[in-house]
Image: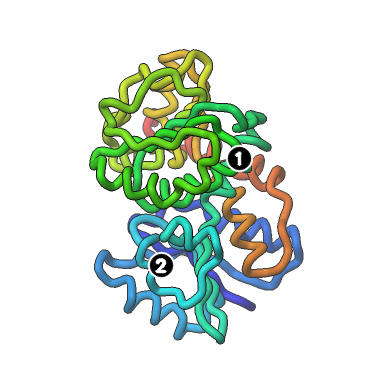
Amino acid sequence: MDHYVVAGNPVEHSQSPFIHTEFARQTGQAMEYGRMLWPLGSFDDSLRALVASGAKGCNITVPFKFDAFRAARRLTPRAALAQAANVLRFDAPGWLADNTDGAGLVGDIERNAGLALAGKRVLLIGAGGAAAGVLGPLLTAGAREVVVANRTLEKAQALVERHAALAGEGALLARELGDAGVGFDVVVNATASSLQGAAVPVPHSVLARGALALDMMYGAAAQPFLDWAAAHDATGRDGLGMLVEQAAEAFALWRGVRPATAPVLAALRTRMALAAAGARAKVER
């Protein structure tokens, strides 16, 4: 039985083991999937130990996506553009790095949320590994304007400059968080603010009426962002759909077959709702 994991810090919240177990059952693949907490500063040693254990590949989550990119000998075009990776496949000729975050985000927005990105104004909050993975696919989906807003403007500018050729006739801009602009059709939070329990890092004026506001986090971590969106006449969406869609891309890279995502996303939302209800019941008792 082939072995895969998701590795990060933190990682205990990850729903990837459930998702990939469902994908394996659906497609008849003989594989197992777990999660591993890697200490900060130990990426290289932890990765070598995982490979030595016989694992076939792994997903990489915060804060190791840039480390994963640097560790691989071979890169897919989307990993090369992002300069960050969330998927590794341990091939004998050399480890292969991919970045499936952007395909997952666009797939969730367009297929699951039913919103075509072509012609839309999009605000991408953050310029770290998560943002780097999704900027290219947002541009190729035909967004009319994409603004990358970050606390450190220089980091946003570097990300924008690397993607300038993909912008085409659309506008691609870098701005500071407090000056991101107003009235965006789609707002994507690619920062770790929700995971850290911090406030939404931009003013509500970034939201057009009826905008889609998507936080890449999910569960309790995403709820304050979803509440913020609802309070300002926007449609909030968590990162579960993106998680399932990017996982399907990784699964296809590893196993050569792309699973159906809709039933797994539905099962995952049910699972999360039951877990939340159970947690509330415990508190009330």
Q: Which residue is mark 2?
A: 68
Asked if 77 appears above or below 49 in the picture, the reply is: above
- Residue 276 visible, this orientation: yes
- Report the residue at 55% width, 55% height from top: 100
Q: Quadrant of residue 284?
A: top left
The disc placed on residue 141 is 1
Residue placed most toward the observer, 283 or 74 = 74
Instruction: Report the mark closest to the observer, 2 or 1.
Output: 1
User: Residue flagged by tag 2: what amino acid is it?
Assistant: Ala
The image position of residue 214, as x and y in percent, is 48, 33
Cα–Cα span, label 2 and label 1: 26 Å
- Residue 282 visible, this orientation: no
The image position of residue 53, as x and y in percent, is 47, 83
Residue placed most toward the observer, 166 or 77 = 166
- Report the residue at 33% width, 57% height from top: 63
The disc placed on residue 249 is none
- Element under label 2? helix
- Report the residue at 29% width, 37% height from top: 197
